[in-house]
């Protein structure tokens, strides 16, 4: 979103400098690389700014806003799954009144969980268990590092050079 806003500002700047589309497109492609707007979108914005448009923000679109995957819904799904890990996506959807596709997206992408079989959400660790596991692994790595350093010091002390 931010990248396209920057590009619209650059397009507006080129229009103010009276650059043609043939001059503007290579400038944008060089500046933004693979993240550059398509040629069609650049033409559309060039035309809008040339006709006098001043606002670089995109206009609101008709239709239902995508607010189902909000932080509030992620928290609600997480809380529900922490009470019972064996809930199906359909049951979560009906309980929280969220569409199944959004629930599936929240479970897989936002919460990082995966389904083990058709109806079950896996028995993954809770947030507290994950934090505890990370702390324990930090201690294991610390112990391992001290053991390795001890071995290397012992090996260096006991080895005698052979000539």
Image: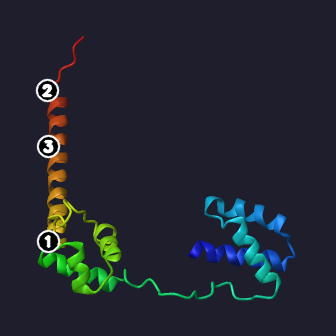
Q: Quadrant of the N terminus?
A: bottom right
Which badge, 1 or 2, comes first in the chain's sequence? 1
Name the side, left or right, on which 97 lies relative to 32.
Answer: left
Which badge, 1 or 3, comes first in the chain's sequence? 1
The residue carrying pointer 1 sits among few (fewer than 14), some (14 to 19) or many (20 or more) residues within 10 Å by Cα, namely some
Query: Which residue lies under the disc numbered 2?
Result: 158
Task: Give 122 or 143, whichever is nearer the viewer.
Answer: 122
Residue 57 pos. (x, y %): 64, 85
Do labels 3 and 2 touch, CB within 8 Å?
A: no
Residue 93 pos. (x, y %): 26, 80
Task: Give 115 or 144, whichever is nearer the viewer.
Answer: 115
Which quadrant of the view contains residue 10? bottom right
Point out which mark residue 147 bears: 3
Q: Residue at x 13, y 26 (%)?
A: 158
CA gap, disc 1 to disc 2? 55 Å
Residue 35 versus residue 45 in the image, above or below: above
Of circles 1 and 2, the one toward us is 1
Q: Of helix, strand and loop, which one carries label 3? A: helix
């Amino acid at each position: 979103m931010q990248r396209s806003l920057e590009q619209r500002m650059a397009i507006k700047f080129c229009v103010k400098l009276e650059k043609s589309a043939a001059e503007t497109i290579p400038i944008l492609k060089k500046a933004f690389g693979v993240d550059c707007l398509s040629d069609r979108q650049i033409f559309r914005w060039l035309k809008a700014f040339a006709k006098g448009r001043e606002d670089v923000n995109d206009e609101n679109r008709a239709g239902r806003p995508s607010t189902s995957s909000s932080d509030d819904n992620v928290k609600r799904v997480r809380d529900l799954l922490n009470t019972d890990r064996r809930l199906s996506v359909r049951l979560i959807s009906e309980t929280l009144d969220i569409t199944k596709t959004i629930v599936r997206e929240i479970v897989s992408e936002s919460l990082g969980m995966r389904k083990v079989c058709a109806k079950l959400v896996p028995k993954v660790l809770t947030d507290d268990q994950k934090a505890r596991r990370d702390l324990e692994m930090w201690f294991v790595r610390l112990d391992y590092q001290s053991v390795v350093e001890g071995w290397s010091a012992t090996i260096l002390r006991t080895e005698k050079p052979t000539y």
